[in-house]
Image (cartoon, rainbow, N blue to C red):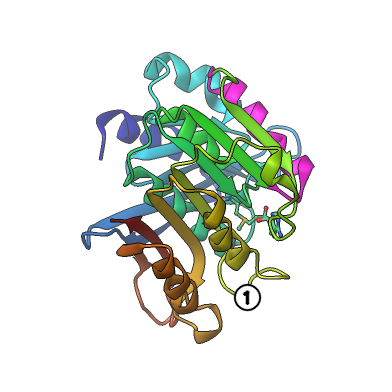
Amino acid sequence: MSHLVSIVSGILGSLSFPFGVIEERFYGPSGEEVPLLFAFGVDSVSYHRALNFVRVGDRIFVDCFFKPLVFPLTNGSGEVIYITASNSIFAKSPVHAQYSAMMVYALEKVPLRGQHFLDLGAGDGLCSLLAKIRGASSVTSIDLNSQVLENLYKYIELNELSYDGVHTSCDDITSCDFKDRLPLNKITVVCANLGANQYENDPNIASILLLEHLPNVKYFLGGGYSEDPKHSPENDISLLRRFGFDKLHWIKQRKCEEYPNPKVTFIAERV
Ligand SMILES: C[S@@+](CC[C@H](N)C(=O)[O-])C[C@H]1O[C@@H](n2cnc3c(N)ncnc32)[C@H](O)[C@@H]1O
């Protein structure tokens, strides 16, 4: 673990009493074990349980309440990322949170500096934010829900980044209305954390079919799947193969009693 992340986790972990820390893990593309940690403390206003921080591997997502405490320690290093944790996707159901964490880790595994990133079903823009921090030249984020998407601008401000190259759009992926409005032809990396049979009208399939209009994409990151046959990535991967994405890298949860159908995220690479 990075030294800085371990210091910040230690300090904020001690503030997470009395609700404490939930620790999980999943496996990265080389079989490496990735620690995933959710730490809960007391909300300063409501005195109810609130998410303090989330650690995914060597990256830590900290609630902005702690920024005055943490920022001087970190000097704006991208290892510590500020969000409004309690409104973020990490604070939704554990299913959502784990899928997002696995997608965050997948993003760590692809080159993003200078790339043009498209986030389909961007939600609060967590993946878009990470792409921006990792040096993507442009970030285009699409979601049905404009209110959640607004968080991305807040996150960009919190992390003292510029809005340069950031485009958000409230659109339905399945309608393709946005095709001519957004700068899609230069996109090189796509992320779609939508899964199979998780949303109406299969936006996961629409995301893959959109590749027809994205000639320069090298990596397609798919999340929201599991080993449950109903949510299996098998069909989506066959479809990706038709677009030349033949090389696959997997991120998987460990199979256990609690997770008999482990969650699955993949990086499909066009070779
Ligand atoms: C699981 S969340 C993923 C959020 C984020 N990308 C992440 O990984 O943390 C899926 C998002 O897809 C959006 N979504 C579902 N169907 C959609 C569609 N047809 N068009 C656009 N967005 C859609 C939902 O509103 C939700 O915010």
Identify the image quadrant of residue 142: top right
Question: In the visual, does 248 lie left or right of 182?
Answer: left
Q: Quadrant of the N terminus?
A: top left
Residue at left 54%, top 62%? 208
Residue at 43% x, 83% y is: 260
Q: Vertical placement of 140 versus 236: above or below?
A: above
Residue 247 visible in the current orientation = yes
33 and 131: which is toward the camera: 131
Q: Is residue 107 above or below residue 256?
A: above
Q: Is mark 1 within 8 Å of ligand 1?
A: no
Q: Is residue 221 above or below residue 44?
A: below
Residue at point 75%, 58% (across, down): 175
Image mark count? 1
Circle 1 residue: 197
The foreground one among 179 and 51 is 179
Say whether residue 24 is magenta. no
Residue drawn at 46 percent across, 22 percent down: 70
On the image, the x and y values in percent for residue 15 come to 50, 36
Quadrant where the image shows the C terminus: bottom left
Residue 80 rendering spot, x and y as whole percentages: 42, 30
- From the viewer's perspective, is residue 257 above or below residue 245? below
Q: Is residue 124 visible?
A: no
Q: Amino acid at mark 1?
A: Asn
Residue 156 lies in magenta, yes or no?
Answer: yes
The quarter holding residue 245 reads bottom left
First to last magenta residue range: 143-161
Left or right: where 190 falls relative to 158: left
Q: Position of residue 64 (x, y in %)?
A: 59, 28
Q: Ligand 1 sits in which quadrant?
A: bottom right
